[in-house]
Image (cartoon, helix red, strand yellow):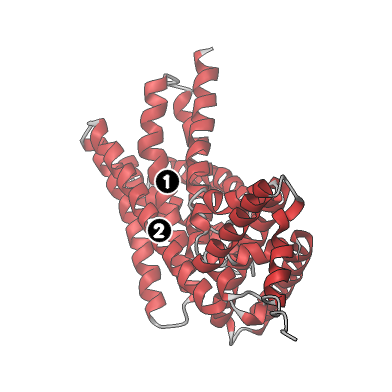
Amino acid sequence: MGLIFGLILASLLPLLFLGIIRRFDFYQIGQYHLILISLGWGFFAYLFASLTNTTIEISGMVARETIDHFIAPVLEEILKCLILLYLIRLPKFTYSVDGALYGFAAGIGFAIVENFEYAATDPSVPAVILRLLSANLVHATSSAIIGIALGVFHLRRTRSRWLVLALGLLLAIGQHMSFNIMIEHITSPIIAIGIGVLGAVFIYLVMQRGKKQAQNWIKQKLGVADRVTRAEVAVVDRLLSVEDLLLPVAERFGPETASKVEKLLYLQARLGIKRKTLESFQKEAELRNAVETEIREMQTEMDEARREIGAYAMLFVRGLFTEDMVSVWDRVQARVRERSVLNGGKKGGGLWSALEERIKGPPEPERLE
């Protein structure tokens, strides 16, 4: 029973980390099926790495310590991230946060299979949690670092991209090597956990930077060409607080309409980021055409979403962050309710009758004969 429980924990806890990091994909660009592909690749990467390391050890050419300290970190990082060489060439790969997410998933897949091997000898909860906070995080964050570097390399068309790629590889492999060496010579679990947590903090900071970069892209690229007003861009810019944002929409038009508005806002955000990405492929016709096709599909989807939402609700959404418009709307509604009470619950509170009277102006004075 202890072994089964240990294996379950060894599987589910790393997936929990993946779920947490998925939440930092603020604009929901990462594709679920690509995350699953990366996760699955991590399983195979572990099997290839284990087989290769064992073969090298059996050959007697290299000592086991050398394999653990130097060969394994290089080999494992390369194998984990081979899938990213394919993913970054897809039109749906948008920016460095994608690389972090897919790389993290591949590392988690690798860590889960490795957990099974260790859980077979020590399935206790403390041992599983220790590996989760140390080795698991090291595998996930090191491959995420390479994913970020590959994403920048793919999208940036300057010479500095080679430097970013080299630094990413050195940082990821260096983290892995340091961990393997230190846990053998320093048995303190605090050191092991510290290396894993520092890697996770680094990924968090990079993804936060990616979020700010994406916000700037949205402001730059989203506009009239996509039938998106400045007011809508302002709403899209506040997507990080989407639940609070859509509360007034749900109150006035219902939760179904609010859900449709949320879908439209995320589509608009992704479109703005996609337009920025397109600039990277001016000299690559195949990728440029693929991204342009995706943009047209997104525009069509946005038009359909607007029709489903309706003109009245769209007008309200566009005024969500225009202070004067919201203020006027609230004052009108308050005035209608006030007049309704004064007029015995009369529909509209007699507001339109009052407006008609004002338009007509004061009655003409009687003429003296």
Helix, strand or loop status at disc 2? helix
Q: Residues within 10 Å of mark 2 (few under 14, many from 20)?
A: some
Position of 260 with respect to 76 (left or right) is: right
Q: Which-is-in-front pick, marks 2 and 1?
A: 2
Q: Position of residue 168 (x, y in %)?
A: 37, 63
Give, as a three-letter code, the residue at label 1.
Answer: His
Residue position marked by numbered label 2 in the rendering: 208
Q: Residue at x 39, y 48 (%)?
A: 72
Query: In the displayed image of the protein, which residue is found farthest to the front?
Result: 369
Amino acid residing under circle 2: Gln
Q: Position of residue 1 (x, y in %)?
A: 54, 12
Q: Quadrant of residue 122?
A: top left
Q: Where residue 362 sits in the image (x, y, percent)? A: 67, 75
Asked whether residue 47 is in view, the answer is: yes
| Residue 8 x/y as whole percent | 54, 25
Residue denoted by label 1: 139
Instruction: Tell me, yes or no, if residue 250 can be seen here.
Output: no
